[in-house]
Amino acid sequence: MSETVYPVPAEIAANALIDNEKYLEMYQRSVSDPEGFWGEHGKRVDWIKPFTKVKNTSYDPHNVSIKWFEDGTLNVSANCVDRHVATRGDQPAIIWEGDDPSEHKVITYKELHHEVNKFANVLHACGVKKGDRVTIYLPMIPEAAYSMLACARIGAVHSIVFGGFSPDSLAQRISGCDSKVVITADEGLRGGRKVPLKANVDKAVAGLSVDKVVVVKRTGGDIAMKDGRDVWYHEEADRVSDHCEPVEMNAEDPLFILYTSGSTGQPKGVLHTTGGYLVYASMTHQYVFDYHDGEIYWCTADVGWVTGHSYIVYGPLANGATTLMFEGIPTYPSPSRFWDVCDKHKVNIFYTAPTAIRSLMGAGLEHVEKASLDTLRVLGTVGEPINPEAWNWYHDNIGKGRCPIVDTWWQTETGGILITPLPGATALKPGSATRPFFGVQPALVDAEGKILEGATEGNLVLLDSWPGQMRTVYGDHERFVQTYFSAYKGMYFSGDGCRRDEDGYYWITGRVDDVINVSGHRMGTAEVESSLVAHPKVSEAAVVGYPHDLKGQGIYVYVTLMAGEEPTDELKKELRDWVRKDIGPIASPDLIQFAPGLPKTRSGKIMRRILRKIAEDSFENLGDTSTLADPAVVDDLIDNRQNKH
Ligand code: WTA
């Protein structure tokens, strides 16, 4: 396979924070002397009481424990807001671009300070105290950032739930961390359509013990307010002062919980803490995007995902950057929206998901050609592997061949980017996340956990901790140990497969567990299965991913019906709607195949390997089917496989 290599462009190299020589030198030090390296870089944030201990971590499955800067104290909101007010009070902190192109707002650091203080006092007035959990279910409006920072200011732990999740999914995530306060908006606005956020909250909290629902007015739509429980944010804000002292937090005090899908069971609450997370989010934001003071930086993610946490809010604001926050979708009012916004706000750094690039690529070049895009300097991608075709399109048409693309590999669990090019240091290969960030020690292992050397392929593990790593699964440390540290002794297992080439570049090949990645969103196949089997007509269900041109992976569902039920197209629609309503639109199955039986071993275990192969159309190498209880089911599955188009 011939592979194009793109060297660092000369204009980038001339001004970059890190060149290749510096990368190699810093990387070497970061892994040979992590204490010294992080002791130094830990100082990039303001500490109330400076740390004297740097790293105290163990991957021993009998005693997994991760602590960074453990005797230091700080406040995240003071770092993201207060410390910039004196030096850059009038600089935009957030540029907010509404769903409707006629709406935008610029929030300076001074204004951000005012808003965050107000919001913090409103939370106090609602009875929120240090250590309490607060669930945030907001659209992409500035209040999302204010409320996160307000929680951090008073030491409350936020748990953001993506606005696309259903009332049931929301309820699960509220009760999972026992939040007594929920922050939402009357309605969200996406692509010109209203999202009934408050109505969803009403359904979700019925039956839960939630004391207060704080409602931000976004659309002014008609909603119900429950006396004694629901309060309007703007009314409460009028009553409180705009001064709230940031609380002194220990480096290892929780900052947030974020629910994410795993290969088994229900979503788990990934817990991130204060000091290490902030050091890592801010450092990666600065170096990975080669962020220079005064630049306009835009990450198109939603704050409901980890990318929004680390690279819309915490990383950029800790660095005193200007971060653009976009309420809408890439294709509204037309597929030129992203590029129009880049021109309108003179965006220098643009970070998005491959799935968005693929869909805009499909919309045609005429939507790009109207924009000049001449302020762009660095491009990024995140969330799923990027196919070289999409990479090239992005590079040539958006970056006009002059902007490096940082393909950033990381996870909710990692808190920040782990494998990535640095714009001024790394020659690029389309489709490769290239090399580890400072302090990150990736390795590839075989099924037995043996470390593989050189150019090879295997399961991606990390051999040592970095400051942004998750600390535990909220309320279930055992699950944390089981999920990440039990497969390979002494290593963190990512769940991803990966190839390493002759140059030591990493190429993520996708999940090797029962997690699928649909349009850059993580989905546990077990979650979709449990939703399906809850339908009265479904007896059994198995869910696998299959290659999908736009989404990266699509959701392929095998369903066995209860005796006597008819396998009709109407029923397929009913099942699709069922999952959509139960989990949310992102979990909606793409293809449903009715199967009289599923391939099982004699002990009754479903052989997913076979189901995956059939969904992928690769019937030739189904592997050994002789252990199946009834090999004939496979022929039926193949004969009735669903078409992709
Ligand atoms: C996948 C998103 C290939 C991977 C930040 C990982 C990627 C999962 C990349 C985490 C990339 C993320 N190339 N695959 N650059 N970035 N992934 O938790 O499978 O939503 O394990 O975090 O997305 O998804 P999560």
Image (cartoon, grey):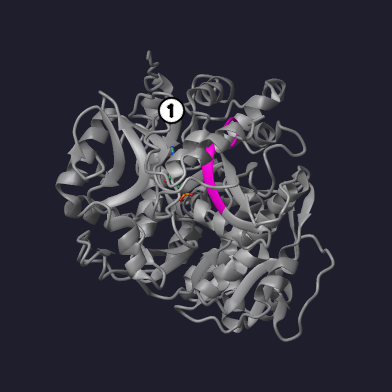
Residue 301 drawn at (x, y percent): 57, 47
Residue under the image location 26 percent in, 24 percent down? 503
Residue 334 drawn at (x, y percent): 75, 34
Residue type, mark 1 in image? Gly
Check the image and name the residue furthest to the top: 2
The magenta stretch spans residue 40: no
Image quadrant holding the N terminus, namely top left
Residue under the image location 40 percent in, 51 percent down? 602
Residue at the spot of label 1: 431
Residue 572 visible in the snapshot: yes
* Segment tinted magenta in the rendering: 541-552
Determine whether the residue tagged by mark 1 lies in a helix, strand or loop. Answer: loop
Pick whichever, 229 or 553, lies toward us.
Answer: 553
Residue 114 visible in the snapshot: no
The magenta stretch spans residue 551: yes
Type of secondary structure dominating the magenta stretch: strand
Asked if residue 481 lies left or right of residue 164, the reply is left
Residue 60 drawn at (x, y percent): 19, 61
